[in-house]
Every structure is written in structure tokens, then in C-alpha cells.
Image (cartoon, rainbow, N blue to C red):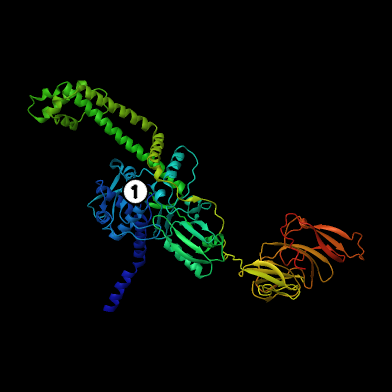
Amino acid sequence: MILLSIMDKIQEKTENVPFLYEEWFLDYASYVILERAIPTLLDGLKPVQRRILYSMLTMEDGRYNKVANLVGNTMQYHPHGDASITEALVNLGQKELLIDTQGNWGNLLTGDPSAAARYIEARLSPFAKEILFEDGITFWQSSYDGRKKEPITLPVRFPLLLALGVEGIAVGLSTKILPHNCAELLEASIDLLEEKDISLSPDFPQGGTADVSEYHQGKKGGKVRVRASIEVLDKKTIKITEIPFGTTTQELIQSILKAEEKNKISIKNVIDNTAQEVDITIHLSSQTSASQVIQALYAFTSCEITISTCACVIHNEKPIFTSVDEILREQVYHTRSLLEKSLVLRMKACQENIFFASLEKIFVEKRIYRAIESCTSFNMVLDTIKEKLAPHIKDFYRPVERDDLERLTEIRIKRISKYNSDEADRKLESLRKEEKQLNKYLSAITDYTIQYFRNLIKKYGNQWKRKTQLEVLPSASTQKPRIINRSLYVQPREGFIGYALKKRGEKTDRIRFAMDCADTDDILVIRKDTRGIVTRVSEKVFVGKNILDLSLYDKEKVYHMVYKDPKGCVRVKRFRMGGATREKEYILGSEHGVILYLSGDGLKDEVVQVYLSPDCSARKKVFSFSFAGLAIRGRSSQGNILSKYPVQRVRREKLKGAKSRGLGLL
């Protein structure tokens, strides 16, 4: 009975496990998404970044602070360990936008880490202090332990999210927003406010060349191809001067060495001289060229990478997928709203100054302070001042309150005795001019925002030169670099090809020179019996007797062929070889057919002269045929009938623009 009771209790508790798991998992996922991994749309910051910057503001005194001290202070607001704060702070510092750094902060180019937090120092940059903070327009919340107040979002008056870029992985989703050029963002912000079209492209601190043709405004599924910048110093030396975003020189060199081990590229050595700028020198082997190696570097190493984008941000306390154009639009309009709120606060402060300066002027000039000498209580003093002020108050923007009266009683005798009426009038006039100017700004807030952005460009634009060049990049060849190192010979009748058929200085009529090639090339051999075979270059290989033509294998190359089938019918075809398996024979015409004419030029306007047998019954024994009317077919097609009469021979009539005759080795 006791055992059954225990089992019932266990079953009762375990029945709630699925519900608890679902509830707790959703809570955890929401926390990671909202509080750790994904930035907020309005200020473009993750919580840890926001807390770091606010913590730095509370410690700001114009001097550098030890990063260890900054991290310790940030822990009052951030409910996680010092390691995560240090990593985020170093990452922000390396972007060289919001934080002014001192000491060894690591190297983005080489991947070297920063020094320990106790050895490096930081302070807010002037740009950060200008765009990030303003108490009056900041909304606050309690910190995680309730002891402090921290900003819900910072009043960022700049498209910061797109300038910094961000990468984060949460539970069930991720974000990848690439960094953009600050000056270009401000120019685009102005265009948005002027209702013009915009086009944003990323700009990476490492430089390089980027193809943004598939960027798709940074939306989910977009991608950017980024290449390193490579210079040719001489025929056997090249230098990498810029690397792709997200890579380091160490990773790049490792990828080059791996490609060399796999025989994808042919180099002698790699020397890394990178310091403040990328300097990777590559010495090439004697059997390769600089252009070939550069293409191989793009194809087989990290010298070219593809970056996928996914613009995911937090908006209205939930994650949304959007585009960089929409992010900029929201941040620009948010900036305009913040500037308007700031102007309203300045207007209120200005009006308060005008209000009290006017009260003070009346209080002193009308000598109201003398009327309070006989008052026996403080309340009587305030009532007397209010009564004496009443006849002189006209068109004030608000009524006089008790606090205003108390403030008048706090004016020192020394100030009253040295009161200068003319100086007070000048101060009031200046305040009224300021009020008028603020009203002007508020009535044209869009123009004011545009001017604000222009002032930022004027002040900081020289620091924001574009580093990444934009180009439409061609596809890098994934083939191994072709090194011309063999002379290929052929024995047409015997059916042998190879680079060892003929020794240097040897003279023979049976062996002919075919071409210079690489030992990695594939060769297409076409025989007179309409058979074709693809084979790799070797010392000596038998490919079948009566070789008619051989050339580098190119599946897209177009051939013209006239052949006779076993029934004696002469056919003509225009075809591509297409994909082929090495050492496998393919019938290009028909079984037991004979080729009468073959050309590898593939030009549409090629015309041949057809000579029929003199004793045939055809009236016209010689006629011309143009390949222009033929469609390109596959290699196995039979082709069109050229003539039912016996054909004696076929010769080319003309071929415009052909570099080689391509008529085979007959």
C-alpha cells in the first residue's frame, strides 16, 4: 500500500512535466531573444552593450578608465559574469566608433586577442557623447536587483545599428546585419527625409572587394561575396593587402596552406608581415603564373567568402525580420522624434528662464522686497510678493506658483544691490531670441533633422572613408590552375597520343606535334569512324586508329561535322560534346559511319563546298552548304541529310574570324 501511494504521488507530479517544460522553455527562449542576442531596433544595441555604454557615462570624467573597473561597474546593471562584459566591451572598442581606446586591444586583422582587462583603458568617444545620451528624453527602468536605474533604450540620434553591424544567435533564430559606412548612412538618412530613393551597401573595416548584387537590402536570404585585395608585385610574387570581413590573416594563411597541400595551388611559400595593415606575401612556383594563382586563391581559399544576411531586430518587445532600408527608415524617424523632444525640453527651459528673469526684474525694479519687511510669517511674505507682482504680470506663459515666490525670497542682498537693469534686459532679449529660434526649429523639424545629420558629416565625415570597394565579381574558377608544361604529340594512323611519343631532336613523319598543354588537361580525340573519347594527358596512350582531330576537352565547344552513314547517306550536324566520362567511347555520328569533314570553330557562317561523285545521277555535282541553318544538337543526334548521292569530298569554302582551321589531322 505504501508503494502504491508513492507511485500515485510520482505520477501526479510527472503529469505536469510537459506543461512545465513548455512554459519554462518559452520563458528561457524569450529571455535569450529579448535580453541577450538580438539588438533593439530603436537604439541598435544589445542589452550588454547598452549597459556598458551607460556605465561608462556614469564614470566619465574625461580621463581613461581601466577596462577592469568599467567591467566591474557594469556588473551593477548586467546580471552576468565579467567575461561576457569584457568580450562585448573589447568588441565595441575594436569598432573604433563609440569608445576611445588605449593599450593593446587586439588586432582585427590578425585575430590576436586584446591584453587583459587590467592593462587596457577606455573612455567614451566625443561622437558617442554627442549621439547617445540625454537625460530628459531617456526612459528608465530598475536594474536586475532593484538597486540602480538603467535606460530601457538609449536616445541614439544616429543609425547606429547599421554602422556597427551585429551578429547574434538566439533560441530558434539568429541575426546577421553587416556594418555600413557612417557617412553613407547619414547621406541616405538625408535622402530619406527629402523623400528620395536610397541604396545601402555594407562597408567592412578589413576592406576588400564586395559584390552586393544579391544583397537584397540585407534581408533574410541575402548574401554578399567578399574578396581579398591581391596585388601582383612581379611574375612570381603577389601580395594580399586586404582580407574579407570575418576572416583573419591567420585563418587566411591556413586556408592557403591547406589548398597547397591538396594540390589546388602551386606556391613556394607564404610570408606574413601584417601589423597595422595586411601584408601577406606569396612566392609562386616556377610553373605557374600570378593570374592563375589569384583565381585559385579565390576559388579554394578564404580569399573569397560568401556572407549570408538576416536582418532580425527587437521591435515592440518582439523579434521581427526586416531589411536594412527599413531599419534606416525607422531609426531616422526615431532620431527626428528624439530631436523634437529635445527641442521641446530646451523650449521649456528657455521659457522658464524668461519667466523667472522677468519675475526677478519686476521684483527688484519695483522694490517689492521692501514690502516684506513688516511681514511676521513666511506665508505672509509669499502672499505680499504675489499681491505686489500681480499688477505687473501680463501674458506670462504660465501662472506664478509658490515655488516661484520662494525662489524670489532666496535672492541675495548682494545681487539686489548690484542689479543692472540694462544687463537684465539684454539677457531677456537673448532668451527671447533663443525662444524664437527654437520655435522655428520645431515648426520645421524635418529640416532641423537634415541639418543635424549634415553637421555630423561635416564634423566627423573625414574619419569615415569607405574601405570596401564595390564590384560585380566574376565567378572564380574551381579548376586547378592550368600550368603549360607538356608538348603533346600524336600518331594519327597508329592511334597513339602522349608527351613521350617523340624525344627532343627526333625526326619522324609518323609522329606530329599537336599542342602545348598541361599534364592536368583532358583531351578530346575524334576518330574518322565518328567515335570520340576523352582522356587525360599522359606519356603514351592508345585511343584508336585513324585519329582525325584532337583538342582540349570543352563540353560547350561547338563542332561541325559531315559524315557518311553505313547506308551511304551523307549527313551534316552541328553539336556539342557535352559531359563525358574519361576513357569511354562515344558515337558522334552512327555506328560504322565515316567522317568526311570536321571543324571545331563552330561559327554559324561557316560554309563548305560539297563535291558529288562525277558518275552520280545528280544534275549539280558541286554545291555550297552553310551551317547557319542548323540548330546545335547533342553529340548522339544523327543530324540532317546533306545528300543521298555519293559524296567525293567536302572542303571549306570560307570561315570568317576563325583563328584555326580546326579541320583535323588528316
In this view, the residue in front, 253 or 619, is: 253
Q: Which residue is mark 1?
A: 98
* Image position of 329 (left or right of 551): left
Q: Give coordinates of residue 501: x percent, y percent.
A: 68, 75
In this view, the residue in front, 272 or 29, is: 272
Q: Give coordinates of residue 366: x percent, y percent.
A: 17, 20
The furthest residue to the front: 505
Residue 125 in view (yes/no): yes
Image quadrant in which the C terminus is located? bottom right
Q: Amino acid at mark 1?
A: Leu
In this view, the residue in front, 54 or 483, is: 483
Q: Is residue 390 above or below residue 327?
A: above
Give the quarter of the image for residue 169. bottom left
Give the quarter of the image for residue 418. top left
* Image position of 639 (left or right of 92): right
Q: Is residue 186 above or below residue 88?
A: above
Secondary structure, mark 1, is loop
